[in-house]
Image (tube, rainbow, N blue to C red):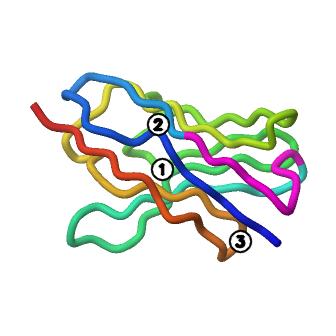
Amino acid sequence: QVQLVESGGGTVQPGGSLRLTCAASGFSVSSTYMRWFRQRPGKELEWVSSIDSTGLRTYTTSVQGRFTVSRDNAKNTLYLQMDSLKSEDTAVYYCAKNTIRGQGTQVIVSS
C-alpha cells in the first residue's frame, strides 16, 4: 500500500529556510518519479519540483535556484530544501507518486 507522509512545514520569515520531508512506504522512492506540488491560498494545485529515478531534478521557474529536491534511498524519504523563502511561497506542500499525494504540510512565510 502506497503511503506518503509530509512534514517539516511551519512559519518562517521572508528570506528564511525550511526543509520538507516526505516519508514514503509501499514502494521505493529511488526507482520512482517523485514530485512536489503546492497549493497557495485560493489557487490551483501547482507543480513545484520533480526528481526521477536517475536523479534528474527539475523545478518550476519561480523556485529555481532557491529550492532543492533530494532523496535518501536508505530512509526511503524525499526532501524539499527551501531557501530564500518569499511570501508567495506560502502554501500547503504535497509530495506525490503519480496521482497519490500525502496529506500535505503547511508553509507560511510571513514577517
C-beta proximity under 8 Å, tags 3 and 2: no
Is residue 68 found left or right of 17 in the rendered image?
right
- Badge 3 crowding class, 10 Å Cα cut-off, few under 14, some 14 to 19, many 20 or more, is few
Q: Which numbered disc, 3 or 2, marks the residue that appears first in the sequence?
A: 2
> For the view shown, which residue lies furthest in the left direction?
111
Q: Amino acid at mark 2?
A: Gln
C-beta proximity under 8 Å, tags 2 and 1: yes
Residue under label 3, please give it. 98
Task: Indicate the quadrant where residue 10 lies.
Answer: top left
Q: Secondary structure at mark 1?
A: loop
Residue under label 1, please give it. 60
Q: Which residue sits at x=68%, y=48%?
A: 23
Magenta span has 64? no
Is residue 43 found left or right of 76 in the rendered image?
left
Is residue 80 found left or right of 100 in the rendered image?
left
| CA–CA distance in space, label 2 to label 1 | 6 Å
Is 12 located above or below residue 5 in the figure? above
| CA–CA distance in space, label 3 to label 1 | 18 Å
Is residue 20 found left or right of 84 in the rendered image?
right
Q: Amino acid at mark 3?
A: Asn
